[in-house]
Image (cartoon, rainbow, N blue to C red):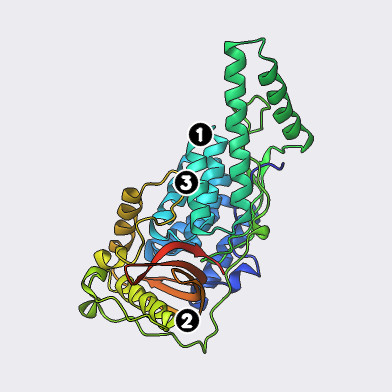
Amino acid sequence: MNRPRLIPLLSAFAAALLISTAPARADEAQEISRIMKQGQQEKALERANSYLATHPKDAQVRFIKGLILTEQNKTGDAIKVFTSITDDYPELPEPYNNLAVLYASQGQYEKAKTALEMAINTHPSYATAHENLGDIYAKMASQAYDKALQLDKGNANAQSKLALIKDIFSKQGIRPTAKPAAMTSNAPAATAKPAPAPAPVLAPASAAVPAKTVAQAEPAKPLPATAAPIAAAKPVAEAVKPAAEKPAPDTKGNDNAAILATVEDWARAWSAKNVEAYLKFYAPDLVLAKGESRKNWEQTRRERISKPKSISVAIHSPEVKILDASNARITFKQHYRASSFNSETWKTLVMVKSNGKWLIHEERIGR
């Protein structure tokens, strides 16, 4: 296991992905990152703050600011920055991962676990978050074994299990620095220097969670400029009616068309910020993140859809696969734009047929 690593920005590979930024904005982010790499954190932070004063929603520069604050050991301020990014851009998994690393460095493993589960819910193929979550579970287990030994010093089983966990962490050489990896999902990234972190302690309650570089995470593919959307998002005034008010489509021998029409309506409801219609496209048994209730999920979606002044969601290159009479899967490129944020990623929806209508049973990032 390795020492936890934050996720940096703007590698050459990640910069080609997902967010469309004007050249001047990209150049500014690159320059701030360059200054940070030179070890001039105060100067880089000052320049980032100056830029954000006129571009407060720029996810790229905000991310770099979070890395700068981490390098300055201003953990509380870094947590605030990454949290604000997850509020404004909930589809980015990397800020959640960085929050988990920061929480783990403080021994707040429950918060770290929750953040990693959010990262995985956003990007199920995000290998770094999966491994980090496993390490969090290991550290929480070591805390439990340690507590068991405090209550019963003769507990041989707890002793052997605790010794095994300590041995694993010791042999893997946990290092006292957290090395940034790359942000690869819905925002550009920039290389950063290793961020200082508290020296690890092998006692179960205080060792920080290990992680690998984000290069293992599977990035979404960029949308070709020539791709044509299925249907342009309609303005708010033309929002689709709630799903409950629409007649069930005639899907006999035409399930592909019915699924495609459902997804088009789902995208239009999302674009129109018609939350009630949007939520009715999801099945009652929707697959959610571990421990998350349907009520909390709906509340989160309401907040995230209502917050931006405008939203546009377009569907490109859809591929429908009928699994059986009541189950199907549709994969497509999703182009999402909200205010100054713009992302393109592959998405897969697992669909179920209920009372003649196709509903979303599971939503995944990736193919």
Q: Is residue 211 left or right of residue 283?
A: right
> Of the residues shown, which amino acid type is indicated by label 2?
His
Q: Secondary structure at mark 3?
A: loop
Judging by the rendered image, the residue that carries numbered circle 2 is: 316
Front residue of 202/217: it is 217
The earlier-in-sequence mark between 2 and 3 is: 3
Kindly identify the residue that appears in the image at 58 percent across and 46 percent down. 71
Q: Quadrant of the N terminus?
A: top right
Of the two numbered discs 3 and 1 in the rendering, the one whose residue sits closer to the viewer:
3
Distance between the alpha carbons at the discs numbered 2 and 1: 41 Å
Judging by the rendered image, the residue that carries numbered circle 1 is: 108
Front residue of 335/364: it is 364
Judging by the rendered image, the residue that carries numbered circle 3 is: 290
Q: Position of residue 311 (x, y in %)?
A: 33, 72
Check if mark 2's residue and mark 3's residue have beta carbons within 8 Å: no
Dot 2: few (<14), some (14–19), or many (≥20) neighbours within 10 Å? some
